[in-house]
Image (cartoon, rainbow, N blue to C red):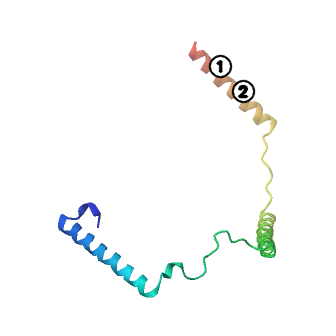
Amino acid sequence: MNIHDLTANQFKRAAAIKEQLGSLIKELRNIFGDATNSGPVPNPNRTMSASAKRKIAVAQRARWAKLRRAKEAQRSAEPVTKKKTMSPAAKAKLSAKLKAYWRAKKARKT
C-alpha cells in the first residue's frame, strides 16, 4: 500500500501506533539495557591474511589452467580447414565485373 493512498483516519491511526511502538521499544531497552551497544563490534576493515590470499590465487590459477587446457583440447579436436583461395582466372573475372560496374555508375552520375 502506498502512503499517498491512506485516508486521514488511517494516517492518524498509523501515527498513533508508531508512537506506541516507540514507547514500547524504549521500555524494552530500559528493562534489558541497551542491547544495541553490547557485543563485539564487527571490524569494517577486515583483511585477509597473506596465506589466505595465496591459497585463493593458487586455486584461481588452477581453474584458469583447466579452462585453457579444455579450450586447447577442443581446438585440436576440430578439423583444420584450408583457407579458400581464388584462382587467378576467378580474380580476373571478378575484377573485370567490378571495373564495369564502377564505370557504369560513374557514367550515370555525370
Q: Does dot 1 land on a helix, a strand or a loop?
A: helix
For this orientation, the residue located farthest to the bottom is 31
Q: Position of residue 7 (x, y in %)?
A: 19, 64
On the image, the x and y values in percent for residue 5 come to 24, 62
What secondary structure is found at the residue carrying circle 2? Answer: helix
Q: In this view, does 96 lie to the left or right of 30?
A: right
Q: Observer-nearest residue: 87 or 82?
A: 82
Question: Which residue is situated farthest in the top direction here?
Answer: 110
Query: Residue at position x 27%, y 69% from top?
Result: 15
Q: In which quadrant is the C terminus drawn?
A: top right
Q: Which of marks 1 and 2 is in front?
A: 1
Q: In this view, does 98 lie above or below 19?
A: above
From this view, report whether residue 18 is shown above or below residue 90: below
In the image: residue 103, left or right of residue 30: right
Q: Which numbered dot is residue 62? A: none
Residue 77, located in which quarter of the rendered image?
A: bottom right
Residue 109 on image: x %, y %: 57, 16
- The residue nearer to you, when weighing 39 against 77, is 39
Residue 105 at x, y percent in the picture: 60, 21
- Quick check: 94 above or below 26? above
Query: 10 Å neighbourhood of mark 1: few (<14), some, or many (≥20)?
Result: few
Q: Which amino acid, by three-letter code, is at mark 1? A: Arg
Instruction: Please tell me in which quadrant of the rendered image residue 3 appears.
Output: bottom left
Q: Quadrant of the N terminus?
A: bottom left
Q: Which mark is residue 103?
A: 1
Give me the residue at 33% from left, 78% from top. 23
Amino acid at dot 2 = Ala
Establish if 53 lies above or below 35.
above
Query: Which residue in the protein does label 2 denote?
Result: 96
Is 45 placed left or right of 59 in the picture? left
Residue toward you, 5 or 67: 5
Which residue is rendered at x = 29% and y = 77% of the image? Answer: 20
